[in-house]
């Protein structure tokens, strides 16, 4: 440990800086899916859930040549619900339990807040 780091940790602990990578983005999470991998990590796919957006639609022409109403019968769209994976995280075994405990603690904090 460097001399500067030792002085910080003796008096006030170690300062941690959060620096966002150029790929960092904010995502909305509706759920997660995953499990243990063959190399001993926990794989967690965080996803948002939504209705499918049509692949394509057909619109009629109005008499004046402008686009009119959609021809709903010709709409092409996936059935069901879309779960769009935003982040696929691989977590080491030694972090799984502390991360779970941290999430539960945050859930307790949220439950105690008056959000209405």
Image (tube, rainbow, N blue to C red):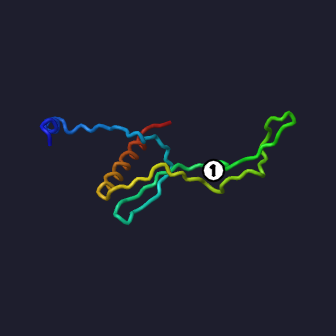
| Residue at image coords 34%, 51% | 99
Estimate the x, y position of residue 16 in percent, counting from the top left.
27, 39
Q: Residue at x 49, y 47 (%)?
A: 29
Q: Which secondary structure lies at badge 1?
A: loop
Say which of 72 and 67 sits in front.
67
Q: Quadrant of the N terminus?
A: top left
What residue occupies the far bottom of the structure in this picture? 38
Residue 25 image point, x, y percent = 45, 40
Q: Please provide percent x and percent y for residue 56.
A: 70, 48
Q: Nearer the viewer, residue 13 or 17?
A: 17
Taking the view exactly as shown, the residue that stands out farthest to the top is: 64
Q: Residues within 10 Å of mark 1 (few under 14, many from 20)?
A: few
31 relative position to 109: left or right: right
Does residue 97 sit above or below 105 in this rendering? below
| Count of number-bearing discs | 1
Which residue does the image show at 40% across and 46% down from the upper left? 107
Q: Position of residue 60 (x, y in %)?
A: 81, 42
In the displayed structure, does residue 18 sit left or right of residue 2? Answer: right
Whether residue 21 is situated above or below residue 104 in the rendered picture = above
Q: Which residue is depicted at the point 73% across and 47% down?
A: 57
Label 1 belongs to which residue? Answer: 52
């Amino acid at each position: 440990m460097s001399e500067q780091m030792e002085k910080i940790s003796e008096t006030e602990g170690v300062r941690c800086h959060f620096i966002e990578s150029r790929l960092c983005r904010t995502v909305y999470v509706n759920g997660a899916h995953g499990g243990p991998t063959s190399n001993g990590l926990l794989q967690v796919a965080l996803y948002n859930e939504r209705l499918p957006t049509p692949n394509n639609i057909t619109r009629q022409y109005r008499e004046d040549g402008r686009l009119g109403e959609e021809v709903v019968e010709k709409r092409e769209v996936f059935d069901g619900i879309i779960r769009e994976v935003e982040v696929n995280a691989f977590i080491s075994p030694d972090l799984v339990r502390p991360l779970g405990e941290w999430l539960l603690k945050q859930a307790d904090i949220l439950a105690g807040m008056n959000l209405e």
